[in-house]
Every structure is written in C-alpha cells, then in structure tokens.
Image: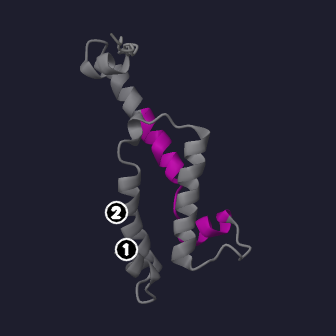
Amino acid sequence: MLRNVWRSATFCLKLILSLFNSNVLSVLTYGSKSWALTKQLEERIQSFENNCLRWFLRIYWRDKITDSFIREKTKQPLVIDKLISSQCRYWGLMVRMGSNSWPHDVHNASVMPVQKRKIN
C-alpha cells in the first residue's frame, strides 16, 4: 500500500520521508537493541535504505548519482547510526541495572548443548 504513496507524484518528498521514518524504519529497527550488528547486516540495511531513498527521488540504478548526494537531497540520517546509538543506550541501561537483574541473567545464560537421541 505504501508503494502507491511512494510512486505518486501528488505527495511531497517531506510527507513521503515522514511516512518512511514512521512506518518502515520503525518496523525495520524493531528489536535492534539486541542484534549482533555484523558488517554484512550493516551493508544490507544500508542498501535497503539507499534503494528506498532512490525510489522516492525517482533515481534509477543507471543514473550515476552518489549516495552522498541522495543524503544531501533527503537530509536523512543513517539508520546504522541510530541502531548503534540505541544499542549503546541499551547496554548502558543493563550496566546500571546491576548483576542481579533478569536481563543480565538472560544475557549471561549458557546454552545447553543439543544431545542426539539414542536409537534403540
């Protein structure tokens, strides 16, 4: 349903970006505080975000437009920066909770090794 809004020429870029930030990025970053942010995951998130911004500006892959130009045009901050700052706040909160709290217990829990069933 959002594709119709994004493709429409009647909506301004500001409205499209606010819808993108409120609907798409909130779903994309849900639960990101506990993610292990790998280089591959960062690249995939960055790629998705750049593709969406290019779609909003109607810039195609054949056009020789840099990502930095798209950032200047849309004035969008990087999603990765938001993820890293939210993770830092989360881990700071865990440190302040103390070692007797349940988030510490969950984080420090050891996983039991899987044992194969014996066939009779």
Q: Dot 2 corresponds to which residue?
A: 23
Q: What stretch is highlighted in magenta?
A: 67-88
Residue 18 magenta: no
Dot 1 and dot 2 residues touching (CB under 8 Å): yes
Corner quadrant of residue 71: bottom right
Residue at figure coordinates x 70%, y 72% from the top left:
65
Q: Image quarter for residue 91?
A: top left
| Dot 1 or dot 2, earlier in sequence | 1
Residue at 57 percent across and 37 percent down: it is: 38
Say which amino acid is labelled 1.
Answer: Leu
Query: On the picture, is 82 further left or further right than 50?
Result: left
Residue 2, numbered circle: 1
Q: How far across and down, in percent of the image, does residue 120 sit? A: 33, 10
Q: Which of 62 and 89 is in front in this view?
A: 62
Q: Distance between the residues labelled 1 and 2?
A: 9 Å
Q: Which residue is drawn at 51% across and 75% down?
A: 56
